[in-house]
Amino acid sequence: MNRPYKPDGYPSVSAYVMVDGAQRVIDFLKKTFDATELRRFDGPEGKISHVEVRIEDSVVMLSDGGGSFPAFPAWLHVYVPDVDATYRRALAAGGVSVQEPQQKQDDPDRRGGVKDPSGNTWWISTQVG
């Protein structure tokens, strides 16, 4: 009997981000990317021990940092159907602009960047050329 080696619908590789204020990041991801929460394990004192959210075909795993697993900022890249609309949603969700969407010479992507409430940078792109 062949047993599945990963949950159904999960990619083989997922980002795991240790953050300061996991719930704020989850709220940001829901408002910006329509992320859906898949699994969640709450820890003591209102901290999140582990949470998984789906953005389109990808899963991002998050945890409140602390102790021997401190929070640290990460850069993540997400392709979206409309970079400009998603960028505006990210700002409305409390993100801070890193770069307004633009297409640089010889780059087939139009790309912008936003920092979430924990300081992670989300590069948002749509391939246009």
Image (cartoon, helix red, strand yellow):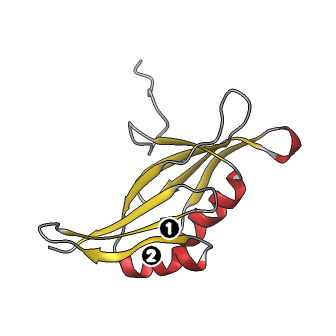
| Depicted 79 relative to depicted 100: above or below | above
Where is residue 64? Give x, y as percent. Answer: 70, 43
Where is residue 88? Give x, y as percent. Answer: 48, 81
Q: From the viewer's perspective, is 24 left or right of 109? A: right
Residue linked to disc 2: 86
Spatial distance from mark 1 to mark 2, Cα to Cα? 7 Å
Q: Residue at horizontal 51%, vertical 54%?
A: 54
User: Foreground residue, 21 or 34?
Assistant: 21
Residue linked to disc 1: 33
The furthest residue to the left: 106
Q: Give the number of the disc on residue 74.
A: none
Screen quadrant of the C terminus = bottom left
Screen quadrant of the N terminus = top left
Quarter where residue 44 is shown? top right
Q: Residue at horizontal 53%, vertical 68%?
A: 34
**Category of crowding for the residue at label 2, using alpha-carbon neighbours closer than 10 angstroms: few (below 14), some (14–19), many (at least 20):** many
| Depicted 16 relative to depicted 27: above or below | above
Considering the numbered disc 1 on the image, is that residue within a helix, a strand or a loop? Answer: helix
Circle 2: residue type: Thr
| Depicted 92 relative to depicted 16: above or below | below
